[in-house]
Image (spheres, grey):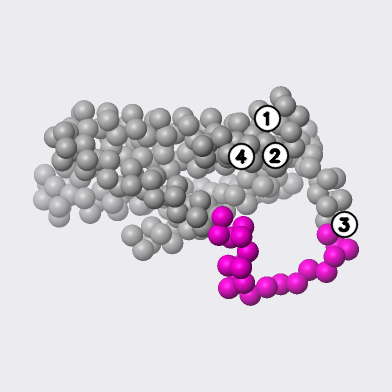
Amino acid sequence: RGILALGEAGNFPAAIKITAEYFPKKDRAFATSIFNAGASVGALIAPITIPVLAQYFKNIGVGGGWEMAFIIIGALGFIWMGFFVFMYDKPEKSKHVNEAELAYIHQDDEEEAKAAAAKAQTEEKSIPFWKCFTYRQTWSFIVGKFFTDGVWWFYLFWAPAYFSDQFGYKSSSGTGMLLILTLYAIVTFLSLVGGKLPTIFVDKKGMNPYQGRMLAMLIFAF
């Protein structure tokens, strides 16, 4: 679990950075929802693979079965990481990005340059880490994550045990797999819809990207 935490902790900031590199502001929320849905897709696949792997290795006498299932799924992450290291490049250097796509990616550059010029006129100072906790934005983020992550991880960890203990549908049974699959299919769909909303607000309502994101977040918060 420690190694899992270290790997996951690096994954999400990297994904956000790449999203900023490859998408203009109005599309970043949708792009983020797609990669963030990867966790839900993993949860969709898990019920129909992990119990089968664990049962197989248990039957052939390799530990309790779950150990090898954990190792095999974990190894897939390193294979994906290998593909990423050798295939990823910034859009300016990538042979898969043409001129039109590059222009679309950089459509915000002029606006950002003006903002940077305006900001350059004011003196900026670095602050120690602890001082971040004196800003209300920091606490807004912490409180928001506290409320949302508690619900999400509760479902993620305890849904299989709940279906098993309360209704007798074990994770290895067909019905148990279907129930978990349905739960995460709903979550994945809502994640993608939520990410698309800001783009719709920008394209259809003429909002700027910040307003579009804030309105989408407010709707889903309610």
Image mark for residue 87:
none
- In the picture of the structure, the residue carrying the numbered disc 2 is 211
- In the picture of the structure, the residue carrying the numbered disc 3 is 117
Q: Amino acid at mark 4?
A: Ala
Q: Amino acid at mark 3?
A: Ala
Q: Nearer the viewer, mark 4 or mark 2?
A: 2
Q: Residues within 10 Å of mark 3 (few under 14, many from 20)?
A: few
Q: Residues within 10 Å of mark 1 (few under 14, many from 20)?
A: some
Q: CA distance from mark 4 to mark 2?
A: 12 Å
Assess whether mark 2 and mark 1 are in contact (beta carbons under 8 angstroms): yes
Q: Nearer the viewer, mark 1 or mark 4?
A: 1
Upstream in sequence: badge 4 or badge 3: 4
Assess whether mark 2 and mark 4 are in contact (beta carbons under 8 angstroms): no
Q: Amino acid at mark 2?
A: Gln
Q: Quadrant of residue 55?
A: top left
- In the picture of the structure, the residue carrying the numbered disc 1 is 201
Upstream in sequence: badge 3 or badge 2: 3
- In the picture of the structure, the residue carrying the numbered disc 4 is 29
In the rendered view, tell whether residue 215 sits above or below residue 15.
above
Upstream in sequence: badge 1 or badge 4: 4
Q: CA distance from mark 1 to mark 2?
A: 8 Å
Q: Residue at x 11, y 50 (%)?
A: 61
Bounds of the magenta segment? 118-140
